[in-house]
């Protein structure tokens, strides 16, 4: 793996390296996610058990296969206020844990690319000294994303409603066009800032948005496309693996297995994200070197 760490990668090469790193280091990568996220998921399972949720299967075991599937899907989608509050708590704890998870996996990718041995606990320990800058930068990025999305969706909603009463077809077309415009425009903008986390992790900067902006220069469309592909891949993996779990209904076991699947998909996405960062770093260093050479040549000529 260390033979091409100084070589800029193309679109397909980034995906190829992502899955080669996952294949070669899956155990260590999974243990990173296990150590970071399992305490949160265990707490969630304990709370669900104490609130009376079924442990293994939610529903009537005497139902037919189709009835079990339908009742299981219904129990998963129809949640109570109590369950929604528990989910909110878990999401909040997950947000605080994500900087450690993403940082540790990024360190693991760095070691894998350089052909070094890596251990889950070692990667986590390397991340902890930068936890607070990572968390603060993540919260700022989330706040910026929220502040950009809300006005856009308000404009889309108001515009669609205003045309709905005059011409529904035009309203639908405008809504689709607005949505595509917001998706592409904000997607490209957020892609320019997306590499903030590894920038904060490896350098003494925070929130790392300026560094990310420089790293993604001339690569915005490529990274934007890679993010879409990674979202699609992780979505397909999640859907395929979660489909059989519907028979468990909204049980504690269903929630635990769903969380394990989310750990796997987070590995795929985060490893790809880290590979993108290191590729952009290689390109940036190459650009900086060329600029230094040009400056040196100009100086020599003068």
Image (cartoon, grey):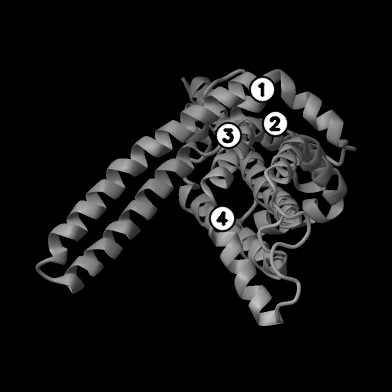
Mark 3 or mark 2, whichever is nearer to me: 3
x, y percentage for residue 136? 54, 23
Mark found first going from the N terminus, 3 or 4: 3
x, y percentage for residue 13? 67, 57
Q: Is residue 274 left or right of residue 302?
A: right
State yes or no: discs 3 and 1 in contact (Cβ < 8 Å).
no
Residue of label 3: 92
* SS at badge 2: helix
Question: Is any part of residue 38 visible from this angle?
Answer: yes
Question: Is any part of residue 232 visible from this angle?
Answer: no
Label 2 environment density (alpha carbons within 10 Å; few <14, some 14–19, many ≥20): many
- Name the quadrant containing residue 180: bottom left
Residue of label 1: 131
Label 4 environment density (alpha carbons within 10 Å; few <14, some 14–19, many ≥20): many
Residue of label 2: 100
Q: Is residue 16 above or below residue 286?
A: below
Q: Nearer the viewer, residue 302 or 181?
A: 181
Mark found first going from the N terminus, 3 or 1: 3
Q: Nearer the viewer, residue 89 or 151?
A: 89
């Amino acid at each position: 793996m260390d033979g091409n760490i100084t070589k800029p990668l193309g679109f397909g090469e980034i995906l190829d390296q992502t899955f080669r790193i996952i294949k070669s280091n899956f155990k260590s990568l999974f243990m990173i996610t296990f150590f970071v996220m399992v305490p949160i998921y265990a707490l969630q399972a304990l709370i669900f058990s104490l609130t009376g949720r079924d442990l293994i299967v939610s529903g009537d075991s005497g139902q037919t296969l189709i009835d079990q599937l339908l009742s299981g899907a219904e129990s998963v989608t129809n949640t109570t206020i109590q369950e929604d509050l528990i989910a909110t708590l878990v999401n909040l704890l997950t947000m605080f844990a994500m900087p450690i998870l993403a940082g540790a996996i990024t360190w693991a990718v760095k070691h894998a690319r350089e052909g070094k041995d890596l251990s889950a606990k070692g990667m986590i320990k390397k991340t902890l000294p930068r936890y607070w800058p990572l968390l603060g930068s993540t919260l700022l990025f989330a706040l910026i994303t929220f502040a950009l999305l809300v006005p856009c969706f308000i404009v889309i909603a108001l515009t669609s409603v205003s045309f709905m009463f005059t011409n529904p077809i035009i309203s639908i077309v405008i809504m689709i066009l607005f949505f595509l415009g917001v998706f592409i425009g904000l997607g490209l903008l957020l892609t320019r800032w997306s590499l903030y986390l590894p920038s904060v992790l490896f350098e003494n900067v925070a929130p790392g948005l300026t560094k990310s902006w420089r790293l993604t220069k001339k690569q915005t469309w490529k990274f934007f496309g890679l993010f879409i592909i990674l979202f699609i891949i992780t979505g397909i993996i999640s859907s395929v693996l979660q489909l059989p779990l519907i028979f468990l209904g909204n049980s504690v076991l269903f929630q635990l297995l769903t969380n394990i699947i989310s750990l796997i998909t987070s590995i795929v996405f985060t490893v790809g994200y880290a590979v993108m960062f290191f590729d952009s770093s290689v390109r940036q260093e190459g650009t900086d070197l060329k600029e230094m050479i040009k400056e040196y040549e100009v100086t020599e000529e003068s």
